[in-house]
Image: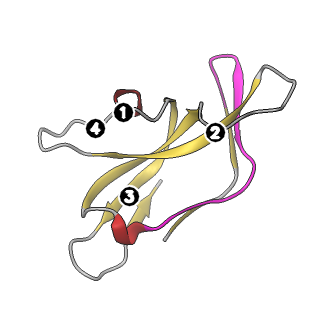
Amino acid sequence: MLVVEPFEISRFGLSYRSASEIRIDLSTVAPGAYRVMAVHNFHTEDCNPCLTECVAGVFLAARRSDGSWEAPERFPVECRAVGVLGTLQVPDDAGLAELFP
């Protein structure tokens, strides 16, 4: 289980916030290296009247075989990359996943 604590990132003149922790079940994630990306989550309805504050989410961007990383914007999940929170290594055995800052 990957647990991402609440966070806030200022970028593009906006503030991106995740107000509660986000949990991702890694048992369904394929082995490999991933960037844990903070993204602007366009799917969540934001009732906040402050237009400079945005809802943030998390996207796991896999490392491709050519060494490049997937980009959240290339997937139909309607989000925009804001920053990298860390790198995650999911093992191909029953070992524990490791998160690196």
| Mark 3: amino acid | Leu
Sequence-earlier tag: 4 or 2? 2
Residue 23 numbered mark, or none: none
**Overall secondary structure of the magenta section:** strand
Neighbor class of circle 2 (other Cα within 10 Å; few <14, some 14-19, many 20+) is many
Q: Determine whether 69 is above or below 62 in the image.
A: above
Q: Say whether residue 91 is left or right of residue 19.
A: left
Q: Position of residue 21 (x, y in %)?
A: 67, 59
Identify residue for label 2.
Answer: 56
The amino acid beneath tag 1 is Phe
> Is mark 1 in CB contact (under 8 Å) with mark 2?
no
Q: Looking at the image, which residue is at 30% across and 37% down? A: 70
What residue span does the magenta drawing correspond to? 10-25
- Earlier sequence position, callout 3 versus callout 4: 4
Q: Are marks 4 and 1 in contact (CB under 8 Å)?
A: no
Left or right side of 68 for 45: right
How much space separates mark 4 and mark 1, taking CA atoms?
13 Å
Q: Which residue is mark 1?
A: 75
Mark 4 and mark 2: Cα distance apart in space: 20 Å
- In the rendering, at what x and y percent does residue 35 appear? 38, 47
Question: Quick one: which residue is furthest to the right in this view?
Answer: 49
Of callouts 4 and 1, which one flags the residue occurring earlier in the amino acid sequence?
Answer: 4
Disc nearer the start of the sequence (1/3): 1
Distance between the alpha carbons at the discs numbered 3 and 4 = 12 Å
Q: Which mark is residue 69?
A: 4
In the displayed structure, 59 sits above or below 30; it is above
Distance from the alpha carbon under mark 1 to that under mark 2: 16 Å
Residue to which mark 3 is pinned: 88
Asked if the residue under mark 2 is in contact with the one under mark 4, i.e. CB atoms within 8 Å, the reply is: no
Q: In terms of sequence position, does the residue under pointer 1 or pointer 2 come before the other? A: 2
